Amino acid sequence: MKNILGREIPEYIEGYGTVKAFKGAFASLREVERKAVKLQSAEPTEKKVLSSIKDAIEKCTIKDGMTVSFHHHLRNGDYVLNMVLEELSKTGIKDIRVAASSIFPVHAPLVEHMKSGMVTGICANYMSGPVAEAISRGELKYPAIMHTHGGRARAIESGDISIDIAFIAAPTCDTYGNINGVEGKSACGTLGYAVPDAMYAEKVVAITDNLIPYPACPIEITQEYIDFVVEVESIGDPNGIVSGTTQITKDPVGLKIAKMTSEVIEASGLLKKGFSFQTGAGGTSLAVADYVKKLMQQKDIKGSFAAGGITGYMVEMFEEGLFESLFDVQCFDLKAVESYRENKRHQNMSASMYGNPHNKGAVVNNLDVMILGATEIDTAFNANVTTGSNGMIMGGSGGHSDTAAGAKLAIVVTQLVKGRLPIVVDDVTTVTTPGETIDVLVTERGIAVNPKRQDLIEKLEKTKLPIMSIEELKQIAEKMTGTPEKIEAEDQLVAVIEYRDGTVIDTVKKI
Amino acid sequence: MERLRRTMLFMPGNNPSMLQNAGILGADSIILDLEDAVSITEKDAARILVRNAIKNVEFYGTEVVVRINPLSSSFGLKDVEEIAKAKPDAIMVPKATEEDIQIVDEMLSSIETQEGFPHGSIKIFPLIETAYGLENIDSIIRTSSRAIGVLLGAEDLTADLGIKRTREGEEIFYARSKVASTCRACKVDAIDTPFADMNDCRGFNKDIHKAKSLGLTGKAAINPRQVDTIHEVFAPAEEEIKYALRVIKAMEEAQREGKGVFSLDGKMVDAPIIARAQNVVKKAKLAGLV
């Protein structure tokens, strides 16, 4: 069958189940139900601390076909996923599903567990490195499921993903399972992505390298969700967990795009008292923040909040009084970790509070402006952040689709040509985020506004900005590069791209 | 067509991705460099690349100038021969002398005839970077009607003079003044030497203001990030534009009323004030500020 975007999708997928076709970004908002959680209540005298991951696995009663979950706040420094899977592999268990909020190059050993048949399913919101490449080559038994950050929280709350055991990497944990991410040698800041796992998994194991006496303070994930606590020597490599600094781009083309983007924001009329803003940690996105910061200073504008994964740069804007508050699901650098620890207006948010479409209102709904990237964007404004130009999986939505759907103004910023390839195309290789939720595309050679935003087109046409149709941008790009040949993919499905509401927006085929 | 030349941005002639983006960086002119930015082993490759870039890359109306190698080197003449056929807006001649300008002018004339380009369409930009060049700017410019401006190259000039180049630039006070004054007399643009330290924002700002105050009309840039700052300094200030527009309005009113002399804010307005105001408005219009 075809979904509303014309993408061909099967009605049933082995290892996934019956497919619900994407029907539009807001078509599924309705009465929903959360699943009930089965749990083992604790007796007053029970102790939670166990001596090893092996003990925890034994206590949790593992079984073939189960789902184990992980969160990605330790990013490319994470040891926990590898340690747990290594221990599981010694038990002879098979056919398990790994539900990790994101997968990084550090998780390369997972490829061997895929080959051995221990891991036959994976879901993640983002993946890069050897695991993503192996999946693209068809080395996982069932297609991987790619969620959005908010969509993963929704899937867990609704029971679409039923987690048997959640393993929570805990930078600090007390002996009765109270966790925070701001202290200890592996401090990573907030733990927003782990919250749904803790609340909805049948068994929850905290794995920490900073076990402290009861009670921890502050507490972000609380004791009533935690079954067991395991102390290990190290949960991660600090160098991979957070980068020391995040830097604004020095690339003149990136800077030009950023400046034009700030002018679009200014012309939109949204840059006023109470302004709310989110941007990623990439160099061009940070440069947009820098230009927005200057505009806010010049015009003496006090914003309401900045959200997302928080960088030191957003912290600087916050500390200068340009925002009342920060909403933080994940700290990107040490400065953000410190700010979250020290400043009560730097607040955490869970993945559900951040972007789940099926709760009573996510933070993304309160966003004025969101700055997004894209590896490709088509003339219907559909954006791909999942696959690269060679068709390989090299990313995923993360919060892309969630914020695009929620923000009043969702702007994709990108160079028009990257690596000799045009970025604006007739059809993206993979649709990650539907075009109906993207308002503007800013490139160094011109700006295209989604025709459904006539109000914005009128405002921008009054400026000196180079406004043109997205087809014109495509022509400019193709004049420079020629039209690239289509990637030849095989028939085998390797990944299912779920929109945030659980419908299937696209699939990825084997390369 | 009269054009603004507040910034002339140097771009290495052997970097394809930079050449591809050269026209979108906001500079009034770009100087595609075949000389110092290109190592001796890359000279012919860069020449081919720049020639093809001029033919094929969209520069969005940015003036395209190519700095050739010195005519005294074995590359200079070949550079002119190859590049002129692609019809750049101008050729920049390093360490220029009257003789060099004469040779380039004649070569351009013959290539223009051969290729069917209008005569005189490719301009010349002498680079003044020797004591000889500095003391003979006037005759160098007047050697060819193609000369549209002069770039002062302070690094080579101070080396030739055997003096130290400093951040403050006192040692080039005379050179800057001489270039500014002579260019004004010859009615061509006077472009200041670039500022090298990208991390010294305050020094950079002072340096641009110094150049402007001495009468230079623009400044070379060696990094795209320098462009906006130079434009800000060389653009007429908002107050200046407002005042100039008021002067012109008052002048037009006075003309309608048949008054020979008139006053604005209680001060007499005479011919030099009107000429200055007209100049400010013209610059502001070219810069898109009015």
Image (tube, rainbow, N blue to C red):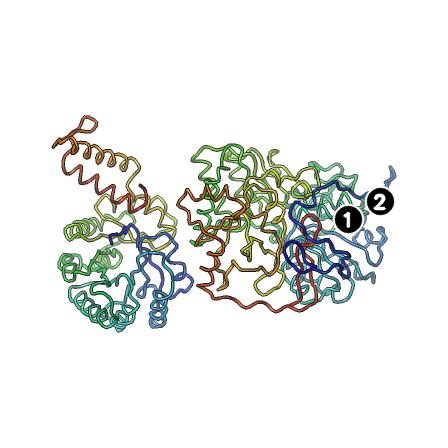
> The residue marked by circle 1 belongs to what chain?
A
Q: Is residue A475 left or right of residue A51?
A: left
Q: Is residue A112 left or right of residue A397?
A: right
Q: Is residue A261 visible?
A: yes
Which amino acid, by three-letter code, is at mark 1?
Val
Q: Residue furthest left?
A: B260
- Picture quarter with the N terminus of chain B: bottom left
Mark-to-mark CA distance, 1 and 2: 22 Å
Callout 2 environment at 10 Å: few (<14), some (14 to 19), or many (20+)?
Answer: few
> The residue marked by circle 2 belongs to what chain?
A
Q: Is residue A10 left or right of residue A480?
A: right
The residue carrying mark 1 is: A230
Chain-order first, disc 1 or disc 2? 2
Q: Are marks 1 and 2 in contact (CB under 8 Å)?
A: no
Question: Within the image, what quadrant is residue A394 found in?
Answer: bottom right
Nearest the viewer among A495 and A214 is A495
